[in-house]
Amino acid sequence: MSDDMYVPKFQAAVDYIVEKIDTGEWPPGHRLPSQTDWADGVENIRVHYGTLRQAYLILKTMDIIEGRQGDGVFVKELKVKGTGKRGNKG
C-alpha cells in the first residue's frame, strides 16, 4: 500500500481519538472535546459534525466511548478480557 492512500475523515478522527486514549493522554472518564470544539479545529484537527458523528458511532460500537445525555462524550473504562470486570489499561 502507498503512504498517500486516502483515509476517510471519519477514520482519521477514529484513529486520532484511539491514539489519545492508547497513549493515556485521554484516560478513562476523560470528556472528549465538544462538537463545536472539533469544528473549530481543537487539537489541530478539524472535524465537522457529520464526520464526528460517524466516528463516535464506530467508537461506541467498539465500546471505547460513551455518550452521557447533557454531559458529553467520555472515554469508557476498559473491560479486562475474560473477567467481566472493568479496569484501567496496563
Image: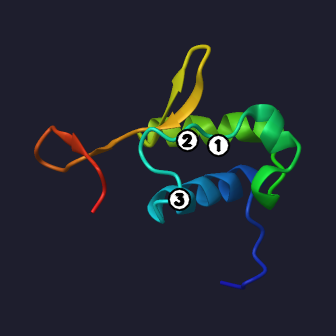
Residue located 45% across and 50% down the image: 27
Residue located 81% across and 60% down the image: 44
Circle 3: element type = loop
Q: Is residue 67 above or below residue 26?
A: above
Residue beneath label 3, please?
25
Q: Is residue 89 left or right of residue 66?
A: left
Contact between marks 1 and 3 (CB within 8 A): the answer is: no
Residue beneath label 2, please?
58
Residue located 60% across and 59% down the image: 15
Q: Quadrant of residue 50?
A: top right
- Which residue occupies the foreground of this view, 61 or 18? 18
Circle 2: element type = helix
Q: CA distance from mark 1 to mark 3?
A: 19 Å
Quarter of the image where the C terminus is located: bottom left
Sequence-wise, which precedes: disc 3 or disc 2? 3
Contact between marks 2 and 1 (CB within 8 A): the answer is: yes
